[in-house]
Image (cartoon, grey):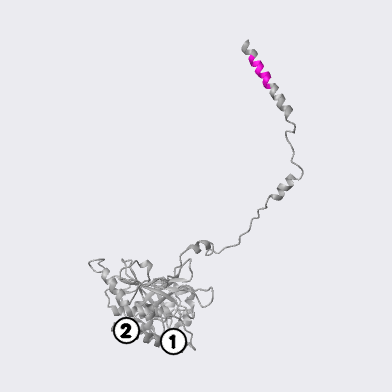
Amino acid sequence: MISFISSMRTVLARQQSVDTLRKLHTSAISEAARKGTREKARKKKVKVEVKKVGFIPHNQRDKKINLQRENLHFDDSWKQLPQDNVYVLKYYRWPVYTVADAIECHRETHHPSMYNVPNAPLIVDIELDMRAEKKNRFVDNFQRMAMIPHKFEHGEERKILVFTKGNDEISEAREAGATLVGGIELIKDITNGELLLTDYQFVLAHPNILPELVALRGLMKRKFPNPRSETLGTNLAEMIERFSNGISYAATKDEHQQDFGLISTSVGTLDMDTQKLEENLRSLLLDVDLIRPKREGERFIKRVLLKSPPSSERLKIDAYQYVPEFYVKTANKASAKSNEVEEREEESSEKQEAVAAQ
C-alpha cells in the first residue's frame, strides 16, 4: 500500500512538471519562417550548369599527362665535359666515339671470355626530328630499303616478283636473282587467283608494262610499284640487288611526342671488317638524309647510337661525318644534289685523313 502511494505521488509530480513546462513555452510548435527568408535562401543557391564537352581527339585526351612526360629528344649540351677518365655518366656529356672505336668496344664485350657472341649484329639507333617544313606539321612514318656496298646475312625472307616485257629485261631480272619474272601472263594468273601476291615481300616493275599493270592496283595497294619507293625503274638489276641485299628500315614517330622518330636496324655483324661496317653505316645515313624536310638551320638526324645485343651498352657516334648537319637551300635541285655529294665526299675524306693522322 505504501509503495502504491509513493508511485502515485511520482506520477502526479511528473504531470505537474510537464504542465509548468507547457506554460513556459510561448511560441507555436511549427513556427513559419520570417518573411523573405526563403527567397534569400533561393538567391544564395548557385545554379550548377552542366557544360557540354565536344569531341576530343584521342591524341589530345591525355594532354595533362603528356606535359609530365619526359622529352625524348636527348640534349646534354649544357652539361660539362668530364675531366677524368672515370666519372658518373649522368652528370656529364656523353662521349662521342669514332665508328671504328665503337665497334672495337663492342667486340671486347662480345669476346668469348665475356658474352661469347663474336658474330652478334651491330644495331644502329637513329633519332630523328620529325617536324616538317610547315609549322605544326610532321613527317609521316616511312619505310625504305637502303642499298649497301657490303652485303651480310640479314635473316629475312625476301621474295621478289618482277613485272616486265621483253626477253632482254626478263633475262636481266632472272640473272640478278629475282624469285619470279614475267609479263602479261603473270597479271592474268594474279587476276584469276592462281598466283598470290602475299607470297612475295616485294613487287618490282619496268615502266614498259605499267599500262597493263594498272589493272592490279586495287589488289596490290601499297605494294604497287612507284618511283618514290624505288620499285619502278629501268635498271632492274640494281633494284633487285637493293631489295635482296639492302638494309630494310622504318622510321616510326612516338605515339605521344610526334616530333620524335626512331630508326633501329642492323648494318652488319661484329665479325665483319671494320671498314665495311663503316661504309654500310654511311650508305644508310645518306639514304635516311634523302627524307630530310626543308627546314633551314635545323637538324634532322639528332643522335646516332651503336649497340650490339645482348649487351645494353649504347655508344654515341658523330653522324655528321657522313651527312650534313643542317639543311641549306640552293638555287636548283640539280646543283643542290651535286653540291651535297661533293661536300659529303670532301668531309668524309678529310675526317678519314684526320683519324689516320691521329
Q: Residues within 10 Å of mark 2 (few under 14, many from 20)?
A: few
Q: CA distance from mark 1 to mark 2?
A: 26 Å
Looking at the image, which is closer to me, 43 or 23?
Answer: 23
Q: Is residue 286 visible?
A: yes
CB within 8 Å, label 1 to label 2:
no
Please state the horizontal and vertical placement of residue 285, each as a whole percent of the image.
39, 78
Q: Residue furthest right?
A: 35
Image quarter in which the C terminus is found: bottom left
Mark drawn on residue 13: none
Q: Is residue 27 left or right of residue 327?
A: right
Q: Nearer the viewer, mark 1 or mark 2?
A: 2
Bounds of the magenta segment: 6-14
Residue 289, quarter of picture: bottom left
Give the percent coordinates (x, y) of residue 256. 48, 66
Question: The residue under label 2 is which amino acid type?
Answer: Ala
The foreground one among 308 and 246 is 308
Corner quadrant of residue 178: bottom left
Residue 4, image x and y in percent? 63, 13
According to the picture, the residue beneath numbered tag 2 turns out to be: 354
Foreground pick, 222 / 355:
355
The answer to whether residue 144 is magenta is no
Q: Position of residue 218 (x, y in %)?
A: 49, 74
Classify the position of the N terminus by image quarter: top right
Q: Nearer the viewer, residue 21 or 355?
A: 21
- Visible in this render: residue 185? no
Regarding mark 2 in the picture, which secondary structure is present there?
A: helix
Using the image, tell me which numbered label, if any, was put on residue 337.
1
Dot 1: element: helix
Query: How many other residues sit within 10 Å of disc 1, few (<14), some (14-19) or many (≥20)?
Result: few
Dominant secondary structure, magenta: helix
Which residue is found at the position 45% from the left and 84% from the top?
A: 207
